[in-house]
Amino acid sequence: MMFEHTDGNPILRLEEDDSWKLIEGTQHGRLVVTVAGEPDIFPVNYAVSDKKLYLRTAPGNKLAELTINSKVLFETDGILSDEAWSVVVRGTARVLENSADIAAAEALGLKPWVPTLKDFYVEIAPISVSGRHFQFGEHPEREI
């Protein structure tokens, strides 16, 4: 996906629809949770359906922390030789508990990266989505 920086600025704020296209075309990111003012970050793989993110997890810090504080950040990005992009989702996480929700999440085909049991599905409902695209280049000279 190419983005035009029509004003010459190497940093372009993306429209929400463009941010969603990038989210949907990627399968990895980082989940940030915060408990008692202490942030924690976890690499995750994910799937998207109806503008919601889904991930699988096992009992542990990630599951416990997002249960204590459902307000989360999610970030995904892509880096190429001459450009990069980053999308941040602010949202609310919930552990799926009813069988219909779990069946819908299972239908997404989300597989764990590592061969461990990850029996819990988590849904992240976005509150806001923001993205930026970056064009790489040489460091500019400072005008005097």
Image (cartoon, helix red, strand yellow):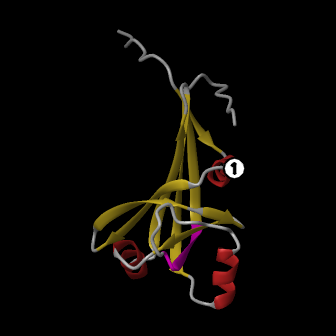
Q: Is residue 86 above or below residue 65?
A: above
What residue lies at 68% left-to-right and 69% top-to-bottom? 108
Q: Amino acid at mark 1?
A: Lys
What residue lies at 58% left-to-right and 66% top-to-bottom? 111
Which residues make up the magenta segment?
A: 118-126
Percent coordinates x, y for residue 130 in the rendering: 57, 51
Name the residue beneath numbered marker 1: 21
Q: What type of secondary structure mainly makes up the magenta span?
A: strand
Residue sitting nearer the eye, 16 or 56:
56
Residue 35 belongs to magenta span: no
Question: Label 1's element?
Answer: helix
What residue lies at 47% left-to-right and 66% top-to-bottom? 115
Percent coordinates x, y for residue 21 in the rendering: 69, 50
Residue at the bottom extreme?
98
Percent coordinates x, y for residue 16 in the rendering: 66, 51
- The quadrant where residue 62 appears: bottom left
